[in-house]
Amino acid sequence: MQVVGLTGGIGSGKSLVTQIFSHLGIPIFNADFESGKILEEDAMVRDTLTQWFGPEAYIHGKPDRRKIASVVFNDPSMLARMNELLHPRVKERFLSWCGQHQSKPYLIHEAAILFESGFYKFMDKTILVLAPEEIRIERVMQRDKVSGDSVRQRMQNQWTDEQKLPLADFIIRNDGKSPLIPAILEIHNKLIV
């Protein structure tokens, strides 16, 4: 069984790509989704975030993601602290999850900051999803109902595509012009051999 990391900048279309892989029967571990569950379920994380952001970090037991994001994505030191808090817990869940899917030819670990976090070093292969910046900004503005400046601020906390390209084994262009499904099928066929 191979473990394949899938990443791309915000708005590149990672979720769409993983949905297609999922339809091919490939299990997907979404690191961002798991981080969200940890924010809600882990008492130590809840206590830590309440210390950092005050009691308003949680509303009716749910994390106020917008408030937390507004601080974290504007403060590199706070972002680093948040990653130090969450990444070991996400990794633990991922390793447990891998044990449940050993019969598959490969698994996909989707993470927005796969390269930035260094977690790509634990992957057998990596896939990078690319899309032009203006398309990415538009997608995130529509999806999250935020301003272009807010999206650009979040982009500054991720590596550029140029930094990621040398670490990618496979590239998928999700620009609305390049055929997406054939590109995914080509990678899938290489990984199942």
Image (tube, grey):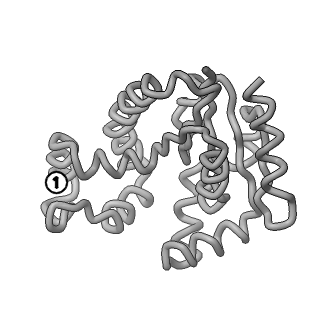
- Quarter occupied by residue 67: bottom left
Where in the figure is residue 123, as x and y percent of width and height?
Answer: 60, 25
Check disc 1 and report the residue beneath it. 50
Label count reads: 1
Where in the figure is residue 159, as x and y percent of width and height?
Answer: 63, 47
Q: Please give left or right for residue 54 compared with residue 115 in the image.
A: left
Identify which residue, 186 or 175, lies in the foreground.
186
Q: Please give left or right for residue 182 compared with residue 40 in the image.
A: right
Identify which residue, 156 or 68, lies in the foreground.
68
The residue that appears at 54% across and 41% down in the rendered structure is 28
Where in the figure is residue 90, as x and y percent of width and height?
Answer: 38, 36
> In the displayed structure, would residue 48 be above or below residue 59?
above
Q: Quadrant of the C terminus?
A: top right
The residue that appears at 59% across and 36% down in the rendered structure is 108
Identify which residue, 189 or 80, lies in the foreground.
189
Q: Please give left or right for residue 5 compared with residue 29 in the image.
A: right
- Kind of residue sitting beneath label 1: Thr
Where in the figure is residue 155, as x and y percent of width and height?
Answer: 59, 59
Identify which residue, 25 or 17, lies in the foreground.
25
Q: Judging from the image, what secondary structure is the residue with disc 1 in? A: helix
Rate crowding at label 1 as few (under 14), some (14 to 19) or many (20 or more) other CA atoms within 10 Å: some
The residue that appears at 59% across and 55% down in the rendered structure is 15
- Quarter occupied by residue 138: bottom right
Q: Quadrant of the N terminus?
A: top right
- Quarter occupied by residue 58: bottom left
